[in-house]
Image (cartoon, helix red, strand yellow):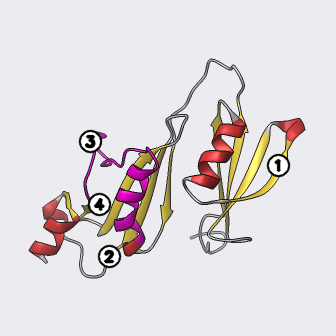
C-alpha cells in the first residue's frame, strides 16, 4: 500500500561538465524553457512541458573525475516522436535505438509496453529519450521492432 497516491514524476537532476553548454543544448535542441539559474551553486532548472509541469535540474560538476551516464525519457506525441528522428539529425544529434546505440532511421517500438521511442545523447553522454505510448495491446513476442514493422504486424 502506498503512503500517498502519486500523479507522476515532477523533477529529475543530471550532473554536467559545462553548465552553459548544457543549458544551450536543453533549451535549443530539446526545447526546454530555462526556469531559474543559481550561479553560486552552478545549477540551472528547466521546465519540461511548460511552466509548473515538470522540471529538469542541471548541476555542474566542474572538473570532478566522476562521470555517470544517466537516462531520462520525455513523453511526447507519436507524431513528434516520429518527427524527432529528422529534427535531431538536422541538429547534428544522432537518433539511436535503446539497446545497442545503433543509429535509427525511424522510431523503435517496445512491444511489451507498447511505446514508440527515439534515444539520443546530451553533450555529457546522458541518454535521453522521446517516447509515446501506442494504442492497442502489448505484443511482447515481437520484442523491439521498428515502428514500420510494428504497424505491418498490427
Mark found first going from the N terminus, 4 or 2: 4
Query: Residue lying furthest left in this view?
Result: 153
- Residue 55 at what x, y percent from top left? 68, 60
Crowding at dot 1, Cα within 10 Å, few <14 / some 14-19 / many 20+, comes out as some
* Marks 4 and 1 in Cβ contact (< 8 Å): no
Q: CA distance from mark 4 to mark 1?
A: 34 Å
Mark found first going from the N terminus, 3 or 4: 3
Q: Which residue is mark 2?
A: 134
Q: Nearer the viewer, mark 1 or mark 2?
A: 1
Q: Which residue is mark 1?
A: 37
Q: Image quadrant of residue 105?
A: bottom left
Quarter of the image with the N terminus in it: bottom right
Q: Is residue 79 left or right of residue 22?
A: left
> Is residue 151 covered in magenta?
no
Q: Is residue 115 left or right of residue 111?
A: right
Crowding at dot 2, Cα within 10 Å, few <14 / some 14-19 / many 20+, comes out as some
Quarter of the image with the C terminus in it: bottom left
Q: CA distance from mark 3 to mark 4?
A: 12 Å
Crowding at dot 3, Cα within 10 Å, few <14 / some 14-19 / many 20+, comes out as few
> Is residue 85 covered in magenta?
yes
Q: Tell me the element at label 4.
A: loop
Mark found first going from the N terminus, 4 or 1: 1
Name the residue at 55% across, 53% down: 29
Residue range in magenta is 80-106
Name the residue at 42% across, 70% down: 80
- Residue 79 at what x, y percent from top left? 37, 74
Q: CA distance from mark 3 to mark 2?
A: 22 Å
Mark drawn on residue 102: 3
Mark drawn on residue 107: 4
Q: Tell me the element at label 3.
A: loop
Q: Is residue 109 left or right of residue 56?
A: left
Amino acid at each position: 500500500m502506498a503512503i500517498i497516491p502519486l500523479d507522476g514524476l515532477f523533477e529529475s537532476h543530471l550532473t554536467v561538465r559545462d553548465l552553459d553548454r548544457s543549458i544551450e543544448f536543453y533549451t535549443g535542441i530539446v526545447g526546454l524553457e530555462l526556469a531559474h539559474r543559481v550561479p553560486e551553486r552552478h545549477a540551472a532548472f528547466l521546465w519540461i512541458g511548460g511552466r509548473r509541469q515538470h522540471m529538469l535540474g542541471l548541476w555542474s560538476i566542474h572538473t570532478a573525475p566522476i562521470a555517470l551516464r544517466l537516462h531520462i525519457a520525455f513523453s511526447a506525441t507519436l507524431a513528434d516522436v516520429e518527427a524527432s528522428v529528422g529534427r535531431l539529425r538536422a541538429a547534428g544529434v544522432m537518433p539511436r535505438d535503446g539497446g545497442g546505440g545503433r543509429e535509427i532511421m525511424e522510431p523503435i517500438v517496445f512491444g511489451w509496453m507498447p511505446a514508440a521511442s527515439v534515444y539520443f545523447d546530451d553533450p555529457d553522454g546522458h541518454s535521453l529519450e522521446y517516447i509515446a505510448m501506442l494504442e492497442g495491446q502489448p505484443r511482447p513476442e515481437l520484442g523491439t521492432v521498428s515502428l514500420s514493422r510494428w504497424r505491418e504486424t498490427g
